[in-house]
Amino acid sequence: MGQFTFVFITSLLLVLSTNIMKPCEAQLSSTFYDSRCPRATSIIRTSIRQAISGERRMAASLIRLHFHDCFVQGCDASILLDETSSIQSEKTAFPNLNSARGFEVIEAAKLAVERVCPGVVSCADILTLAAREASIAVSGPSWTVRLGRRDSTTASRSLANSDLPGPSSTLAQLISSFANKGLNEMDMVALSGSHTLGQAQCFLFRARIYSNGTDIDAGFASTRRRRCPQTIGTGDSNLAPLDLVTPNSFDNNYFKNLNQRKGLLQSDQILTTGTSATFVAEFSRNPRAFATAFANAMIKMGEIQPLVGTNGIIRRVCNAIN
């Protein structure tokens, strides 16, 4: 055997053995259900929009639910699982307890899809689509969602407590938290802009409004104190809008509020410092830039560590494993 022939055969065997050992990597695709369940997206859209038409605030809750899912174990619908003898539910983690909402909306969408295509569409995909439909329903941007996620059989309360950024996080902590999920600083600021929607409980912003700090407008603090007493344990669950101007519409007023030192949470106002301030300034001036950055960041976030192929399961109901 000549040297050239030997080298060629050796190289060919190496390629073949590499391909044999390498598993087929399933990919997310925007057409994933086109043949499996053609009506899936439209059924989910109808269900989500009905829920939001009944309660406008639900749009913010569904976007937040998706965010809190993806930051813990990836976008696998683990946040939807109830507590069992073998599952420590993420619903009882501090960032979610008496705070995360919209579980029944996802279950209703799942039930509607199951009637048409039983055992086909994952709860993880429903939650991802729900976030997009929530944005559209309140005049926010749309984006292409690649599908094919599967559902976890586990949840992690401990990861929910450690990986989800909190309302008192420093800028460095926020940047690190998002970077750990593959999201850059612009993604972080854009996703924080989801606080153009929704409300927060008094105990989350009490320290800020009574701080007498230079980073909060005195009039704004005074207004918020009316429904949020200084005494801990009094009025803790009283709500205030994250965006005091248009709390139920997707726009860039959140960033304008920050420029006026009227961010409700400390983790919001902190974005006006350091390198993040550049993005806050840009998004406050240019609503289209914000909408584009938000959509792009939602795509990236929605593809954090998905379970695909034969990993995970397709749950029959979203709050329990089969």
Image (tube, helix red, strand yellow):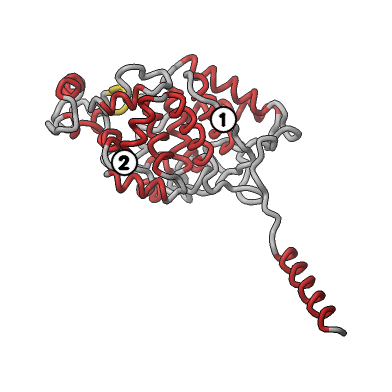
- Above or below, 311 relative to 64: below
Front residue of this view, candidates 7 and 249: 7
Q: Nearer the viewer, residue 3 or 54?
A: 3
Q: Position of residue 251 (x, y in %)?
A: 41, 21
**Horizontal and vertical percent for residue 262?**
24, 25
Give residue 55's quadrant in the image.
top left
Assess disc 1: are there few (<14), some (14-19) or many (≥20) residues with their C-alpha within 10 Å of its C-alpha. Answer: some
Question: In the image, is 294 to the left or to the right of 27?
Answer: left
Residue furthest to the right in view is: 1
Mark toward the start of the polypeptide (1 vs 2): 1
Q: CA distance from mark 1 to mark 2?
A: 27 Å
- Which of 150/207 is in front? 207
Q: Amino acid at mark 2?
A: Gly
Residue type at numbered disc 1: Trp
Dividing the image into 4 quarters, which one contains the N terminus? bottom right
Classify residue 285 as left or right of residue 38: left
Q: Which mark is nearer the camera, 1 or 2? A: 1
Q: Quadrant for residue 283, please give it.
A: top left
Percent of width and height locating residue 252: 38, 23
Query: Dot 2 corresponds to which residue?
Result: 166
State the residue position of label 1: 143
User: What residue do we see at 51% from left, 19% from top?
Assistant: 137
Q: Residue visible at 34% across and 36% down?
A: 278
Q: Is 22 rendered above or below residue 135? A: below
Q: Residue furthest left?
A: 212
> Where, quadrant-wise, is the C terminus in this rendering?
top right
Counting from the top left corner in percent of width and height, residue 30 is at 66, 35
Callout 2 crowding tier (Cα within 10 Å): few <14, some 14–19, many ≥20: some
Residue 282 horizontal side relative to residue 315, left or right: left
Task: Indicate the secondary structure of the residue bearing disc 2.
Answer: loop
